[in-house]
Amino acid sequence: MGYYQEIIIIPDQEISPHFLWTKIMTAVHHRFSFFADADGLINFGVSFPDYDLRRKSLGRRIRIFAETKQELLQLGLDDKLAVFSEYVMIGSVRPVPEHAGHVFYRKVHEKPRLEVKIRHMMKKKGISFDDAAMNFTEAGREIRNLPRINLVSSTTGNHFPLYIKKEDCSSASKGRYNSYGLSTTAAATNATVPEF
């Protein structure tokens, strides 16, 4: 990955960063979908420079990566995210620094049965997803401790959490990314993004 564009969420007393993450990632995902191949894979990767596992936080920044400056300009995030101009700063396209390390950011899937149980408990007790998840054993512990973005499916309208796991890597690995810009688990498409 040779170039990146950074989006920074501006702190706001009235609007939750979680709400903004939902809106931003939905818009970015939608834009990525225009560049997906038949398998739903894209050439754009994302990173979260302020990722904090201890606080289960993605931080306030997201970086979108591509091989060329032209690819990022064609993506057109400036226009797509203009509606959020009061809440985000969108940086210019820049080259990736030479000293950058390499990491994977992956979507972690919940076991479907576990999520069904958690959602059932949410409705039954009228509690949040996190509170309901605390009642289950080790099966979902790793997932519950990861940062997440709550999204809404554009096809079904269902709400779902997008859990994101960061993994360090000693060297760069080229490949494709899923429609959220995250590394896939398939060896042929497993790709790192720069970390700096």
Image (cartoon, rainbow, N blue to C red):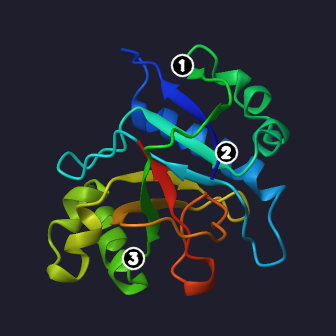
Real-space CA distance between mark 2 and mark 1, rounded to the nearest whole angstrom = 15 Å
Instruction: Say left or right for 149 vs 145.
Output: right
Rendering coords of residue 177 (x, y %): 63, 66
Q: Is residue 87 above or below residue 134?
A: above
Tag 1: amino acid: Tyr
How crowded is the residue under tag 2: few (<14 C-alpha within 10 Å), some, or many (20+)?
A: some
Q: 126 or 161: nearer the eye?
A: 161
How crowded is the residue under tag 1: few (<14 C-alpha within 10 Å), some, or many (20+)?
A: some
Rendering coords of residue 5 (x, y %): 62, 34
Q: Mark 2 points at which residue?
A: 28
The residue at the point 43 percent across, 83 percent down is 112
Rendering coords of residue 155 (x, y %): 73, 63
The residue at the point 38 percent across, 83 percent down is 111
Q: Name the residue under label 3.
A: 110
Mark 2 or mark 1: name the one nearer the start of the chain.
Answer: 2
Q: Is residue 55 above or below residue 160?
A: above
The residue at the point 30 percent across, 44 percent down is 57
Residue 87: which numbered mark, if any?
Answer: 1
